[in-house]
Image (cartoon, rainbow, N blue to C red):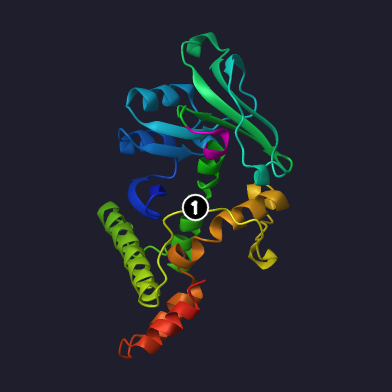
Amino acid sequence: MKLHLKFSLTSAIAVDFVLGDAHSSERAAFRAMLQPEQTYVLDRGYMEYQLVKDVDDSGAWLVVRAYNNIEVETIEDLPIILPDEMKGHWSTVRDRIVRPKDPEYAHISFRLVECTVGTTTYRLITNLYHLTTFQILLLYAYRWQIELIFRYLKHTMHGVHLITHHPVGIQNFFYVLLLTALLHLHFKQRCLAEEGQNPPDLLSIPHDINERAVQMSDDTDRPTNHLAIARFFARLNDALARFWKISKHWLHTLADCLNRPYTADIVRLLNKYAV
């Protein structure tokens, strides 16, 4: 079984999913969830020129990582716009409008944003022409949130242990799992609000971070295996974790308090483990 999950960066919650078998197509599942006037951020497993055109024709937008071996020709070079504090993290940055060299897809044009972080090169295809170079790179960086929610559903919520193998039962299982996660999130933010802590309306990327918050992956296939990328993601997550991350410590504290009256002491205790 394979879970194709749609995650909203605006609300930081899962909003839709499609279930398929172990060999089901990611692109087919994506097309089933595709809606106009929405922006989709996809990893390179979805990369396909026809998919780029289908998204554009549907009135939606996308940022999708391309394979490094794609061959394109430049139509127009675009200005590279990056904040000064980020220029030291990214190298060989390029922004341009291109078309594929493959004659079958030469009628398709798109924007291609490229950069190197550490030893990893990113080539991002998009049909968003009104955003800056940095905004395109930042959108793709936030795609990592889908990996975090998969980890949360699998390990924190024990979503890998199915209670049924009937298709309808599995679908209901994931609906309940996502609703439970949503209720946890709503309750956590309510507790924080009672102490005057509210989600920020505007996020800035901090210059300095606590190095203990930097989590490098041991998996060489993951971007966070590189220290520069791990630091960048830690900077992005710094302001978000308090309001949108449900940790095991917070859940264990909540479980311990279920038989107690809901008081200001409970709120303070839960908020202590907000991060």
Circle 1 sits in a helix, a strand or a loop, which is it?
A: helix
Quadrant of residue 158 within the rendered picture? bottom left
Tell me if residue 132 is in the magenta stretch: yes
- Residue at position x 37%, y 66% in the image: 185
The answer to whether 6 appears left or right of 234 in the picture is left
Is 215 in front, or is 195? Answer: 195
Name the residue type under label 1.
Gln
Residue 218 on image: x %, y %: 69, 56
Q: Residues within 10 Å of mark 1 (few under 14, many from 20)?
A: some
Q: How many marks?
A: 1
The answer to whether 250 appears left or right of 121 in the picture is left
Quadrant of residue 74 within the rendered picture? top right
The answer to whether 67 appears left or right of 163 in the picture is right
Residue 190 on image: x %, y %: 34, 72
Tell me if residue 18 is in the magenta stretch: no
Say if 87 sits above or below 167 in the image: above
Residue to which mark 1 is pinned: 145
The span shown in magenta is 131-135
Residue 230 on image: x %, y %: 66, 54
